[in-house]
Image: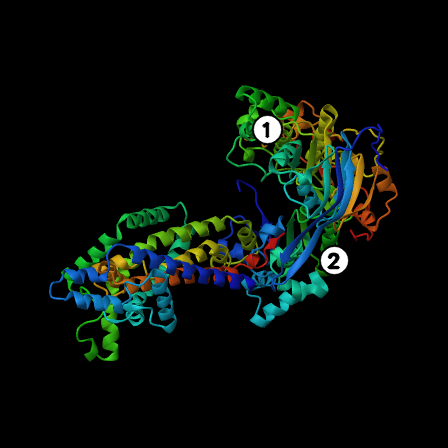
Amino acid sequence: MASGSVLFDGKDLLSAEPGVLQGIRGKSISLIFQEPSVALHATMRVGQQVRQVLAAHRIGSCDELDRRTSAVFEILFGEESERIARSYPHQLSGGQRQRILIAQAIACRPSIVVADEPTASLDPTTQMEILEVFRALQKSMSLAMIFITHSPALLSGFADRILVLYAGRVVELGPAKQVLISPKHPYTQALFRSIPALDETHDGGKRNLPTIARDSDIPSLPRSGCRFEPRCPERMDICKSKDPGFVSLNASHVVSCFRYENQ
Amino acid sequence: MNAVENDKNVQPLLEVENLVKTYFRRTLTGSRENVRALDGVSFSIFPGSTLAIVGASGSGKSTLAFCLACLEKPTSGAIRFEEREILQFDEKELRGVRRKIQLIFQDPANSFNPRWQVLEILTEPLALQGNLSREEIRLRAHALLEQVGLAAQMDGKLPLELSGGQRQRLAIARALIIEPKMLILDEALSALDCSVQAQIANLLVELQRSRGLTCLFITHDMAMAAHLADEIAVMSKGRIVEQGHPDKILKQPQAGVTRELLAAVPRLDSAPAQEPES
Amino acid sequence: MRYFLRRLVHAVFLLVGVSVLAFVFTVLAPGNYFDEMRLNPQIAPETIDALRTQYEVNRPLPIRYAHWVGSVLRGDMGFSFAYNSPVAPLLLVRARNTLLLTVTAMLLSWGLALPVGIWSAVHQGRMSDRLLSWGTAALMVIPDLALALGFLILAVKSGWFPTGGMVSLHFEDLSFLGRVRDLLLHMALPTAALVLSVLPLLVRHVRAAVSEVLDAPFLLAAEGHGIPPRTLLYRYALPAAANPLISLFGFSIGTLLSGSLLVEVVMSWPGLGPFLLEAILARDLYVVIGGVLLSTFFLVGGNFLADLLLYWADPRIRTETSS
């Protein structure tokens, strides 16, 4: 980390000791990895893998650990929980593996769960199921979630707030409904336009999808000015030289763009 | 009920009849399980058109792609390419067919040799064919790089220096360099960001127009399938349950599976069944 | 289950095949035990001929082989010309002595190689790891013979260790503890020579296997769940790195009987190696074949054990698909 701070419960995580961090990981803040097929240990039974997370934070005696593990499996798998707990990862489907990752993440009842593209490798039906699981968990555990995705449509009806990142900078942040239905930042707008809609007409000629010009490249040197400027369809002169600050469109919606500076 | 029968005399480029693929799996207890990945699949594709095969995981889509690209042998059934029955071919003739049908995989990160540069990756298929000079090969490679939207100066880069979208473009270029008749794209867009998906989709449309390519597009993304394809076939548990023009599939789905897939497509502006308190 | 039955049948076939080959080659090799005797003018030719008939040296090959197989099944494993006794007890005593040495050496070397290799993999690239790398390379370069001789010199010069043999002359008179001490003293240097010759290779293999696993995503994911570092290493990384190591382990069992020949000869340890060497030089046919068979048995058994361990350790092997 080059600069900035990460505060949790009043403590700065960036300058914390490794021992303290290890205590926080999995217990207060937990992470759901992206690729369930490689995030699980190949030769350990999945029940054991969940139990290990509990054991690492010394939740209680052996019996207590077993009890908590079964409880978590009940929540996520219902009837089949026993059979699944004894299986190995390669015997489970993608959706089931994703649920194991979720089980590991919620086992210690953390305050925050960070989910990194949890549905990226799943097909649409399973995606919907997993989103349902998240919704149910949020309600029952009053879980705070940071859901990272590159598919904005998933967040519809699911997220409370949406934060849009480009090249390491926040470009837009606001209530989900507002951002999804009327996005303000040119990047957000272009992004949403490039998704094919189900209700477009198919009259035999295939139209091109609107795309964002050029490829995104990772800028090697820090430069001044808006990061999106080279590809922005609405760019102005000022965008090249100065970093746009944050403009509040209303009480909860901010945008980082010069277009909205003088409103 | 084929959507692309503009000329009654045109024969399908690829005809699949009753394809079956079974394999055995051993469970942890030691017993043997019979898995029918493909359970009697039949369809045909006309030259210059795109057929999209849509289905959930485990429906057999990838097995189908591998069988068509001659990477696996089906247990029974017939595949006719350019009106010739290819399942009877010996290894030499099969190689000839493989050149005409190219497969593009889902994972742009892992489909290349990580130590080879872009130019080597691109020219390897041509070099293997062995009938062009090195200079000619280089020229073709550069021309193709331009066609897919990669700068010619990228030919010295390694795959890990390219972005996901650029790698997929490279995969397409590599597939096209030996001028195949048909491209099979097995979830080729699924691992990409949505804006990059749009770019690659546009590229595919353009290439189809300019080269008369036939495409088999395998995906679980109904929206993209409807956008790109002339015809959609819905697969479930190794069978095709519904087939037809995108409009018809979208507006009047018959099979339960199709309806489920459509319902699962995330939409930007819709609200879900339950409204969360916010 | 069927997997193992198949492997077992293969193993048996292998043993039979090796026995045939060993038999044929040893018999066909020029010279036999009695040629030496012939040169001795004190032994009458008739005695030699009588002995030859008794030992069936003149009968055709397949018949001799059949009689030998019968002898193996009876537990005798043939007859030694030189020692005038069935081969089996001779071999087994010597094999026991060798195993005493090699099993101890194997346990010690694996016991050392695992933690050292893991530590080295974790500290990859740092100065300590590089020093260890040079150390193991240097050890590997030193020939086993030099190591054994070096230890022998140590024993002679310092007087702390006996210079040869397995037990002292007065072994029988010692108390139980005294006997144990005596044996350990005699074992110390040969075991040390064996361990030092095998250890560097093992350490490198362990290091390579573990460092490959250390980059894996599942390890990062486990760290993200707050699993403490020691658990990460021993319950997550090591089992995942186990596959190549298990195969290596099986192979080292195979060399249990044969790997210590040099050390045994130099340090006068009464093991299988020197015994077989003598037998070969004397053309003591059935001892040689018996020794070869015993070694093969260990080799095949070691591989079989490795297969068993792999099957048990890696559930993915249990559920292989085939079409």
Q: Residue at x 39, y 54 (%)?
A: C117
A231 w.r.t. B243: above or below: above
Q: Which residue is mark 1?
A: A224
Q: Residue at x 22, y 72 (%)?
A: C182
- Return the mark for residue A181: none
Which percent across, then down, holds residue A5? 57, 45
The residue furthest left is C42
Residue situated in front as seen by the camera: C123 or A13: C123
Asked if one can make out residue C82 in the rendered structure from this viewpoint, the answer is: no
B141 w.r.t. C313: above or below: above
- Return the mark for residue A136: 2
Q: Residue at x 71, y 45 (%)?
A: B61
Asked if one can make out residue C22 in the rendered structure from this viewpoint, the answer is: yes
The image quarter containing residue B229 is: top right
Going from N to C along the chain, the mark reached first, 2 or 1, is 2
The residue furthest right is B252
Q: Residue at x 25, y 57 (%)?
A: C262
Disc 1 chain ID: A
Disc 2 chain ID: A
- Left or right: A257 as drawn, with respect to A42: right
Which amino acid type is marked by label 1? Ser
